[in-house]
Image: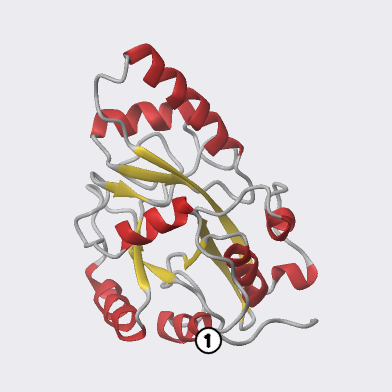
C-alpha cells in the first residue's frame, strides 16, 4: 500500500499556539468536562451535521462552554464560518461577556492496521501543504489514507492528532490505541458516549480501560459529543 511512517520519531514542527492551548486543556480533561465545559468533537452543516456554524456558536454561548473545536469531516469551512460569526458577535456585543474559545479541527478517515478509523486533528495550520489531501471534503486516498501518514501530516502542520471513539471499530480499542501510539498519535478520545445516552454521559466501560491505557502511554485524553443533530449536548 506504499510507504508509511512507522515510529514515534517522525518529523514534526513545534505545536502552533492553538494546538498548545488545546494540549494544555486536554491535560486536565475529566469525565465531566463534556458536554458543558469543553467539546472537542462536533459537526456542522458543512459536513454531515444539522447545525449551522452560527447555531453551534449560539448554543456554545448559551451552554457556557469554555472551549470547543468544530471537527467537520475533511474540511474547515464550518470552523471558518463560525470564526467569522464569532468575530461579528464579539463586535456587536462590545466584548461585554466572556466567549468560548474556538479551535480549528477536522475529522479524517484513515486505515489503521487494516481497520477504517477516524482521526481528529486540532490546532493545525490550515494552509500547510501537508494538510492538503485532508481538507478537500472527501476521505483521502492511497498513501494519504494510511494512519501513520495522517498522523504525520497533522503534526507537520503543528497540530495534535487524536484517535476518535476508539471503541467503535472492528478491532479492540487496546489494539488500535497501541498501534496508533507506535505511529506517534498524541492522544485518544477517552470520554465518549457510546450508544447516544440522554443525558450525555461518557460510557463507564470501555472508558475506564481506555483512560487507564492512555495514562500508561502518556497520551492526551479528549472528550466530545460527536454532535450530528440539533443539540451540542448529544450526538443525534
Q: Is residue 202 above or below residue 236?
A: below
Give me the residue at 46% from left, 86% from top. Answer: 178
Instruction: Please tell me in which quadrant of the rendered image residue 205 appears.
Output: bottom left
Q: Looking at the image, can residue 94 be seen?
A: yes
Q: Position of residue 16 (x, y in %)?
A: 51, 55
Q: Position of residue 217 (x, y in %)?
A: 36, 84
Q: Position of residue 17 (x, y in %)?
A: 46, 52
Total labels: the figure holds 1
Give me the residue at 31% from left, 20% from top. Answer: 95
The single residue placed furthest to the left in the displayed view is 32
Q: Is residue 222 left or right of residue 85?
A: left
Seen from the viewer's position, the closer of residues 4 and 96 is 96
**Position of the N terminus by quadrant:** bottom right
Q: Position of residue 53 (x, y in %)?
A: 49, 31
Q: Is residue 190 above or below residue 124?
A: below
Instruction: Please tell me in which quadrant of the rendered image residue 88 appears.
Output: top left
Circle 1: is it few (<14), some (14-19), or many (20+) Cα within 10 Å? some
Seen from the viewer's position, the closer of residues 229 and 182 is 182
Seen from the viewer's position, the closer of residues 223 and 96 is 96
Q: Is residue 195 left or right of residue 98?
A: right
Where is mark 1, residue-wise? 182
Q: Looking at the image, can residue 194 be seen?
A: no
Amino acid at each position: 500500500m506504499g510507504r508509511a511512517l512507522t515510529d514515534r520519531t517522525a518529523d514534526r514542527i513545534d505545536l502552533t499556539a492553538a494546538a498548545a492551548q488545546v494540549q494544555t486543556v486536554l491535560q486536565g480533561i475529566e469525565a465531566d468536562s463534556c458536554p458543558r465545559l469543553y467539546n472537542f468533537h462536533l459537526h456542522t452543516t458543512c459536513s454531515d451535521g444539522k447545525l449551522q456554524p452560527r447555531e453551534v456558536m449560539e448554543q456554545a454561548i448559551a451552554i457556557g462552554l469554555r472551549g470547543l473545536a468544530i471537527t467537520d469531516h475533511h474540511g474547515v469551512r464550518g470552523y471558518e464560518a463560525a470564526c467569522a460569526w464569532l468575530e461579528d458577535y464579539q463586535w456587536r456585543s462590545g466584548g461585554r461577556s466572556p466567549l468560548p474559545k474556538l479551535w480549528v479541527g477536522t475529522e479524517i478517515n484513515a486505515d489503521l492496521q487494516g481497520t477504517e478509523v477516524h482521526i481528529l486533528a486540532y490546532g493545525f495550520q490550515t494552509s500547510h501543504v501537508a494538510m492538503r489531501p485532508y481538507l478537500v471534503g472527501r476521505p483521502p486516498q492511497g498513501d494519504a489514507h494510511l494512519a501513520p501518514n495522517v498522523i504525520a501530516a497533522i503534526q507537520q502542520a503543528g497540530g495534535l492528532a487524536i484517535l476518535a471513539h476508539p471503541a467503535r471499530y472492528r478491532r479492540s480499542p487496546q489494539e488500535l490505541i497501541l498501534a496508533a501510539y507506535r505511529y506517534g498519535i498524541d492522544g485518544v478520545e477517552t470520554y465518549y458516549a457510546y450508544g447516544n445516552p440522554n443525558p450525555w454521559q461518557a460510557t463507564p466501560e470501555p472508558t475506564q480501560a481506555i483512560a487507564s491505557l492512555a495514562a500508561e502511554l502518556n497520551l492526551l485524553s479528549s472528550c466530545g459529543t460527536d454532535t450530528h443533530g440539533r443539540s451540542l449536548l448529544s450526538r443525534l
